[in-house]
Image: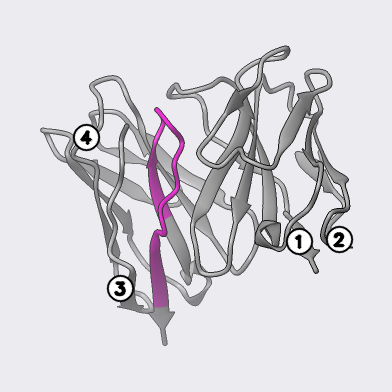
Amino acid sequence: NAGVTQTPKFQVLKTGQSMTLQCAQDMNHNSMYWYRQDPGMGLRLIYYSASEGTTDKGEVPNGYNVSRLNKREFSLRLESAAPSQTSVYFCASSKVYRTGTGELFFGEGSRLTVL
Amino acid sequence: DAKTTQPPSMDCAEGRAANLPCNHSTISGNEYVYWYRQIHSQGPQYIIHGLKNNETNEMASLIITEDRKSSTLILPHATLRDTAVYYCIGTDKLIFGTGTRLQVFP
């Protein structure tokens, strides 16, 4: 039982390059999320998908796009990477959104460095 | 929005109870409080959650004040492996603050 799987785990980009972070969950969860965590900081919500077919902005959506490809997969795209996007990115999923049964399950993180 | 406030750091002796407070004075009436912890740079791990009543599971206990403006996570017998950053969040916006860095010492 893999839970939440993120790829790649590490990536180095040059400023202006684009890339997509992939996330897949095998728990049949309805809701999925992308967070970023900068050194010494808490997690900040970038985008979320409360259910298949919907996506919404979180706290820090600028510079990112997302796609909920199907119920299992939720990808995060950086169209033109900037050094300020150097961070650790976490994908999470939950059975439902915003309720008492909505505990978040996190992936191991993707460490992105933009030079 | 339920913005939470936690002390930045706490220490606890191994074997003693660790009591981690969280202020969530703006929480709405139907909004749950969740606790997570993050060990090193791993993804956060769920610990416990509650709405109004106190809760207990195999990992911890959660005490929520009657007015729901604050809560306390209790690790009854802290071990070195409990050294981590602990976050309390509300389910409305799922916003993680900077949490409390708990250091358990021998």
Tell me which amino acid carries mark 1: Arg
Q: Is residue B95 above or below residue B16?
A: above
Q: Residue at x 78, y 26 (%)?
A: A67
Would you name the residue on which mark 1 appears?
A111
The residue tagged 2 is A11
In space, the residues marked 4 and 3 are separated at their CA atoms by 31 Å
Query: Is circle 1 on the same chain as circle 2?
Result: yes
| C-alpha gap between disc 4 and disc 2 | 39 Å
**Parent chain of label 2:** A
Tell me, yes or no, whether dots 3 and 2 are on the same chain: no
Give the residue type at disc 4: Thr
Residue positioned most to the front: A16
Residue B26 badge: 4
Q: Are marks 4 and 3 in contact (CB under 8 Å)?
A: no
What is the chain identity of the residue bearing mark 1? A
Q: Secondary structure at mark 1?
A: strand
- Report if the CB atoms under discs 1 and 2 are less than 8 Å apart: yes
Q: Is A86 colored magenta in this rendering?
A: no
